Image (cartoon, rainbow, N blue to C red):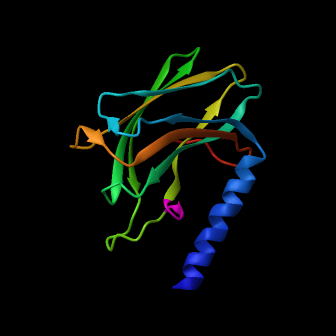
């Protein structure tokens, strides 16, 4: 079991380091400490990119120990400008296994990364991203920050 966890950690670190060298955008929006309200949309604006190519996008979450669920469902709407091309995603974030063991990195605060999309963009394209949670509970406790990371990925095929 430990070998599987070590290999998974090693792959995650290698992927993070590989993407980090080509990071185009990385930003977090803070969520109020009392909880993330269902109607509170978080917005991210990726400025015009400098090079055409394939890009990898991830949603990142930070939680504390008060997060009460095994997972979180997010609705992500994205517009690529100037084309006006719209993308809609439902992202099911698995944050703990069925026994409640947390999958994130950390001790009392946890960090998660969830792949969102691989896109082929042209020089000058920009993105507008909106994220809301899609849980039955109106106020979602335990989420402290929601982020977007966006990196150039020359060897990845675009497809979502």
- Residue found 66% across the figure and 22% down from its top: 47
Q: Position of residue 66 (x, y in %)?
A: 36, 55
Asked where in the image residue 26 lies, by quadrant, the reply is top right
Q: Where is residue 156 in the image (x, y as percent from the top left)?
A: 67, 48
The residue furthest left is: 136
Asked where in the image residue 18 lies, by quadrant, the reply is bottom right
The residue furthest front is: 34
For the record, the magenta segment spans: 104-108
- Residue found 56% across the figure and 38% down from its top: 148
Total numbered circles: 0
Asked where in the image residue 38 lies, by quadrant, the reply is top left
Q: Where is residue 10 in the image (x, y as percent from the top left)?
A: 66, 70
> Magenta stretch containing residue 47, yes or no?
no
Judge from the rendering whether residue 54 lies leftward or rightward of residue 95; answer left or right. right
Query: Predominant secondary structure in magenta?
Result: loop
- Residue found 53% across the figure and 65% down from its top: 107
Is residue 11 depicted above or below 43 in this figure? below
Is residue 156 depicted above or below 50 in this figure? below
Q: Position of residue 85 (x, y in %)?
A: 50, 21
Judge from the rendering whether residue 62 lies leftward or rightward of residue 72; answer left or right. right
């Amino acid at each position: 079991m430990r070998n599987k966890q070590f290999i998974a950690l090693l792959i995650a670190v290698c992927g993070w380091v590989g993407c980090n060298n080509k990071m185009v955008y990385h930003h977090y929006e803070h969520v109020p400490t009392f909880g993330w309200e269902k109607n509170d949309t978080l917005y991210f604006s990726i400025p015009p990119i400098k090079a055409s190519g394939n890009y990898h996008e991830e949603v990142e979450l930070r939680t504390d120990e008060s997060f009460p669920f095994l997972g979180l469902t997010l609705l992500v709407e994205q517009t690529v400008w100037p084309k006006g091309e719209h993308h809609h995603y439902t992202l099911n974030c698995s944050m703990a296994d069925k026994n409640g063991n947390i999958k994130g990195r950390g001790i009392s605060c946890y960090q998660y990364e969830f792949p969102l999309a691989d896109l082929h963009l042209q020089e000058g394209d920009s993105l507008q991203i909106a994220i809301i949670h899609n849980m039955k509970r109106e106020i979602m406790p335990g989420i402290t920050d929601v982020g977007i990371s966006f990196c150039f990925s020359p060897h990845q095929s675009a497809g979502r």
